[in-house]
Amino acid sequence: MTTVRPAAPAYLDERSGRTYPLTDPHRWRGDDGTPLTVTPLTGLAPADVDTSRRSLWRYRAAFPPLLAPVTLGEGHTPLLEGEWDGVPVSYKTEWANPTGSFKDRGASLLVSYLAHHGVTEIIEDSSGNGGSSIAAYCAAAGIRARVLVPEHTSPAKIVQTRAYGAEIECVPGDRDATAAEAVRRAEAGAVYAGHNWHPYFLQGTKTLAYEIWEDLGFRAPDNVVTVAGAGSTVLGCAIGFGELLAAGRIDRLPRLLVAQPAHCAPLYASFRAGAETEVPVDTAPTIAEGTAIRRPVRLPEVLRAIRASGGDMLAVPERSIEKAVLGLAHKGLYAEPTSATAAAAVTGFARRGVIAPGQDTVVILTGSALKTAPAMERLIDGAPR
């Protein structure tokens, strides 16, 4: 069966219901300042997967219209059978992407969109992985990139971003201060490729759902465990599995089980309070630097996605994250602390009975520890012999 696509996809402000055309490369949020998505598209049938492509572009039939892909071979990452703390799981190892993290999925779609519309220069803000990913794809597309980073960003991530030819600018303060500065410049006229804001980035991360579906023989797992800062893996999975459910390709949504570091857990705080908006929360520095976002711009949408799936959340202590980093490494899985937070959460979810025996559980390991060498060295040197 061939999928019938909607005639005119558009940007959608889910909070107001307002739509905007896809044709303006300066458009990255609604007129009232709210984040946008792309209107729902029709999920694929197995026959629609282009198996000649060994990248996420095998799911091109599920994307909004794009003329030519900017691709470095992203996606098509391994799904490895294993276990965590006695719980059978499968690990989706996203460090197999070209720049070492899941962010390449969104970057490929986002930069393809910008290149399609003739953009020649962009700004981005990032704590590391997003910036290096956007920089790599801009290099492939011939687009100049300026990446704003928090002043305490991992040096390895900055070096990688610079290697792609991007201009780096360190912003005093934390991750939120960096984002605020990028937004200020976007409002002044710069083309903003903010991966936490741009709707096309989520079109790339939704391929996580399609790929897991294909990996499992075109079926959904019971649970997907991931870590969230801004929540793009959560929303990507929600969009992708939602499209598959609407198309009748799966019979239920997998539960989205989402972890945050206890030192910076605004999504968790709102989830546990039963709120739909931000609640006051104290934060502190965390080894999981990729999740250190105090005010996620898509917080209501992330909470809605978790609840709609019947999912749950956990706040993971720093010591548990550190132990998970080493525990994964002792299995041959070299995960950065941010993604190891998801593995640490499996223990808590299993103890609470959220993950039950016999269920299919996929743990998304979002990025490589090669990006966080100083933190890894400290952990290894402090580990018991």
Image (cartoon, rainbow, N blue to C red):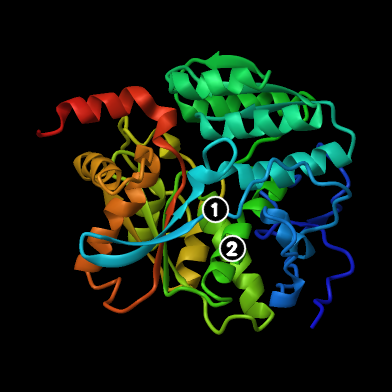
Check disc 1 and give the amino acid type.
Thr
Near-viewer residue (338 or 49): 49
The residue depicted at 76 percent of the width and 23 percent of the height is 188
Residue under label 2, please give it.
211
Q: In the image, is 245 to the left or to the right of 341?
A: right
Q: Residues within 10 Å of mark 1 (few under 14, many from 20)?
A: many
Residue 32 in view: no
Residue at image point 33% right, 22% down: 374
From this viewpoint, which residue is outermost toward the left?
A: 385
Q: Which mark is residue 77?
A: 1
Look at the image and tell me in which quarter the N terminus lies: bottom right
Q: Quadrant of residue 49?
A: bottom right
Mark 2 or mark 1: name the one nearer the start of the chain.
1
Inspect the image, locate mark 2, and give the three-letter code of the amino acid beneath it: Glu
Left or right: residue 210 versus residue 233 is right
Say the numbered circle drawn on residue 208. none
The location of residue 84, given as percent across then percent down, is: 26, 59
Tag 1 secondary structure: loop
Of the 4 image quadrants, the one containing the C terminus is: top left
User: Residue 361, percent across and down?
Assistant: 38, 68
**Can residue 99 be seen here?**
yes
Mark-to-mark CA distance, 2 and 1: 8 Å
Q: Measuring 43% from the left and 23% from the top, which residue is drawn there? A: 154
Residue 197 sits above or below residue 8 on the image: above
